[in-house]
Amino acid sequence: AQSVTQLDSHVSVSEGTPVLLRCNYSSSYSPSLFWYVQHPNKGLQLLLKYTSAATLVKGINGFEAEFKKSETSFHLTKPSAHMSDAAEYFCVVSEPFGNEKLTFGTGTRLTIIP
Amino acid sequence: DADVTQTPRNRITKTGKRIMLECSQTKGHDRMYWYRQDPGLGLRLIYYSFDVKDINKGEISDGYSVSRQAQAKFSLSLESAIPNQTALYFCATSDPSGVWGGYTFGSGTRLTVV
């Protein structure tokens, strides 16, 4: 069985400072891992994906995440927060072998302080 | 036009009523999914279909049913709506061979059961 734990339900940072959203996962196999973003009253947008290639994954809008197998973590970072980054972020795991079902974390709400 | 279209966008219905949420896609994907989103719980899988003849229950299928009318259409029904089915519902499609994980989400249907 697979599961995802997002360690913070709410993160606040000042504009221009770094962002760190933490995610730990559990999977019986080598998983695929995703980060999705949901802006208020919007659908879900894929930020980035890890699929056992490079452990450091670069996504859209300056975000990146590092897969650390030894720590079972896939934390999302951005060097400098922008006001438009305010949204809810979901860490997601999917197991291989044709099972493409996604398991979502409970989400982290990111607030940007002007 | 959106790749995955959900109708209606918003719906208020009374307890005990039957309601259908519709999803259509132009991605040409075989795999389709219904998720519900509740605050603090992330997205949870209700039903999924890997092709027109394949329907599978997700983790929270009780009280719901689905119909895969064609490759492009996947409907979710609540036979007798109850207030705890008030949530934001998302339809998604996937293509396992896709470069970016292949998941595409609709914009969501906000359902309120009173």
Image (cartoon, coloured by chain):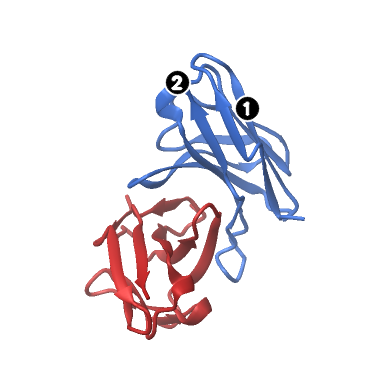
Residue at the spot x=52%, y=55% of the render?
Answer: A98
> Relative to B24, does residue B96 appear above or below in the rendering?
below
Q: Position of residue B89 (x, y in %)?
A: 52, 40
Query: Label 2 sits on what residue type?
Result: Ile
Q: Where is residue B21 in the image (x, y as percent from the top left)?
A: 62, 32
Q: Is mark 1 on a helix, strand or loop?
A: strand
- Chain of the residue displaying label 2: B
Callouts 2 and 1 close, C-beta under 8 Å: no
Determine whether, in the image, residue A95 is placed left or right of residue B77: left
Q: Nearer the viewer, residue B6 or B48?
A: B6
Q: Nearer the viewer, residue B40 or A112?
A: A112
Query: Label 1 sits on what residue type?
Result: Met
Residue with the mark numbered 1: B20
> Relative to A31, does residue B26 appear above or below in the rendering?
above
Is residue A24 shown to the viewer in this render? no
Which mark sits nearer the N-terminus, 2 or 1?
A: 1
Residue at the spot x=37%, y=45% of the render?
Answer: B39
Q: Position of residue B96 (x, y in %)?
A: 58, 60
Q: Where is residue B33 in the image (x, y as percent from the top left)?
A: 56, 44
Residue with the mark numbered 2: B82
For the image shown, how many numbered marks are present on the structure? Answer: 2
Label 2 neighbourhood size at 10 Å, few (<14), some (14-19), many (20+)?
A: some
Q: Nearer the viewer, residue A54 or B3?
A: B3
Quadrant of the drawing holding the N terminus of chain B = bottom right
Q: What element carries label 2?
A: loop
Q: Chain B is drawn in which colour?
A: blue
Q: Chain A is drawn in which colour?
A: red
